[in-house]
Amino acid sequence: MTRKAVLICPGRGTYNKPELGYLHRHHGDKAALFAGFDAQRSAAGQEEVTTLDGATRFSVSKYSRGDIASPLIYAASLADAQSLAKDIEVVAVTGNSMGWYIALAAAGALSAEDGFTVVNTMGTLMQEQLIGGQLVYPFAGADWQNDPARKAELLAIVADINTRAGHDLVLSIDLGGMLVLAGNEAGLSAFEAAVPVVEERFPMRLANHAAFHTSLQAPVAAEGRKRLAAGMFSQPKVPLIDGRGHVWWPGATDTQALWDYTLGHQVVEPYDFTRAVQNGALEFAPDLFIVTGPGTTLGGAVAQSLVHAGWQGMSGKADFKAQQAKAPSLISMGDDAQRAIVTG
């Protein structure tokens, strides 16, 4: 019996110390795939992906860099996407932020090699320019229940800060029960001063993250468009759900428009991951939501997005946990126990 799945690719911040060695542990059979990626890195004078993954020591300052994290996450995620059990039918693919680039390759709109070129190019450009920064702050409570009033209140604070001279601050990613905000130092600091500390860790700055999905990234988008040709893009083989919740259908996709979105709107406008997940649920009614590795941090945002949509009658964290215990519908491939549920 076929299991239908929406495949979800993670973004930056998912390759951390526990993930060091991920490619070697899980994908010893994909040497040819990684050799192509390594060749691109070597030609650019960059450290090879397999060398980075095979290191004996992890440091946040190095591995959180865009030109290091992006290619590692791409390699791990795409390899996971190629490792699914034969009874799983991927009915749609989406991703969070940088995960959109991985989704393009996982859905066949970019070849594995061209997808790597896109990720490595954009990750390197982001790191070289490192314009602005990001922080994360929750609006949902510990029970994960949606709180539109609190969300609106926080976004009003953001909008007010953004009107101040010398302050840039806007929504970067709508991430389940979290808001990812991006801006310049003045904007980020003003928000940190304006809200209470929650769970002893929020607001949380994200190391080596630029102001992704904001107009501050216009120079990065422009340079990306110069370096990455529209001819790299082709018809997706399975439906692709982008950062607006829009579906790009096989056989009906304008590939020029797909290139334009990927290196335009997707870079400089807010990314609505919540809507992408919810539309995946409502449009495709999958049996499973499979989050590729590395890491497991995206699972919470996926679960919260489903709860906020009332998926299968869920209204909070307890409902989700009960459903997962009965018949898991959300699988994180970065978790070894869950991984076994969806691999061959």
Image (cartoon, grey):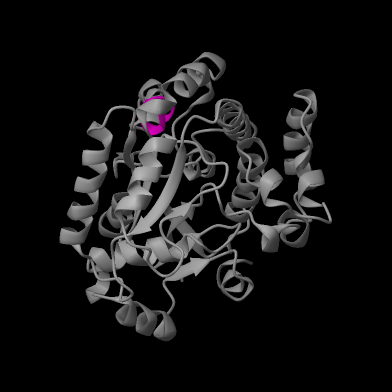
> At 33% from the left edge and 65% from the top edge, which residue is drawn?
304
**In this view, 228 is above or below 241:** above
**In this view, 211 is above or below 330:** above
Residue 161 appears at what percent x and percent y? 26, 39
Is residue 100 rendered to the left or right of residue 31? left
Indicate the quadrant containing the C terminus: top left, top right, bottom left or bottom right: bottom right
Q: Does the magenta stretch include residue 169?
A: no
> At 49% from the left edge and 45% from the top edge, which residue is drawn?
99
Q: How many marks?
A: 0
| Prevalent SS, magenta region | helix
Q: Nearer the viewer, residue 64 or 189?
A: 189
Residue 160 appears at what percent x and percent y? 21, 40
Residue 124 appears at what percent x and percent y? 62, 29
**In this view, 155 is above or below 133:** below
**In this view, 113 is above or below 314:** above
> At 41% from the left edge and 70% from the top edge, which residue is drawn?
199
Q: Is residue 92 visible?
A: no
Range drawn in magenta: 261-267
